[in-house]
Image: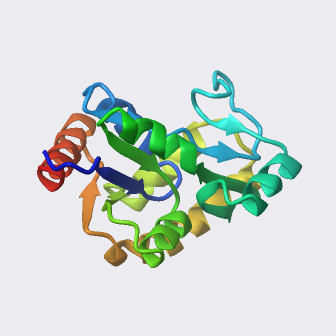
Amino acid sequence: MSDAPGLLVLSGPSGVGKTTIGQGLLRDPRFGRAVTATTRRPRDGEVDGRDYLFLSMVEFEQGVDAGRFLEHALVHGNRYGTPRDEVERIQAGERICLLIIDVQGAAQLRDAGVEALYVFLAPPSWDELERRLRGRDSEDPEVIERRLGGARVEYDRRGEYDTVVINDDVERAIGEIQGLALADHS
């Protein structure tokens, strides 16, 4: 392994399985996930500090003004960002830091020259992506339609990434990303 802790940026459209893939990667103790901050409301079962850092809009804006975020973006009407101290916490433990962020955030990191392995997670088909989003039952139909529209725009930016991984089989996708990240970090 190199002396510098690695950084793995995982992006893709809503419903593609980023959280599931991330959980699979985190079974490997060589990986750690930076907890992202958001202004959206928690979904059923989500825990503050574990799934996200749930902040008010005022708290989030104060963090932006103080330079506490490595990247931040407005996504589907809510603010999301990666706290710098979260990345530093993972890297201090000599683990590969996993960032599960949107396409806008990944572009900010690339534009800032942040060295990382940038992986775009793609759906096996649009029908499957739509089925997954509608199956969540956690959002209004208008929100789902907005997410589907955003998914097409995000998918068109997949060429900006180091690699695209199709999430057609969860364990296969986890293994592929794990292998890429470990090879990139060796």
Q: Is residue 73 left or right of residue 64?
A: left
x then y, percent, for residue 15: 50, 48
Q: What residue is at 67 percent from the left and 61 percent from the top?
A: 75
Q: What residue is at 55 percent from the left and 69 percent from the top?
A: 104
Asked which quadrant contains residue 73, the reply is bottom right
Q: Is residue 30 visible?
A: yes
The coloring applied to the image is: rainbow
Q: Nearer the viewer, residue 185 or 177?
A: 185
x then y, percent, for residue 66: 74, 58
Q: What residue is at 35 percent from the left and 76 percent from the top?
A: 160
Q: What residue is at 88 percent from the left and 51 percent from the top?
A: 58
- Residue 21 against residue 82 in the figure, above or below: above
Q: What number of labels is visible?
A: 0
Q: Residue furthest right?
A: 58
Q: Is residue 152 visible?
A: no
Q: Is residue 21 left or right of residue 104?
A: left
x then y, percent, for residue 40: 75, 44
Q: Nearer the viewer, residue 169 or 185?
A: 185
Q: Nearer the viewer, residue 63 or 117?
A: 63
x then y, percent, for residue 17: 42, 43
Image quarter (top left, top right, bottom left or bottom right) of the N terminus? top left
Q: Is residue 45 left or right of residue 93?
A: right
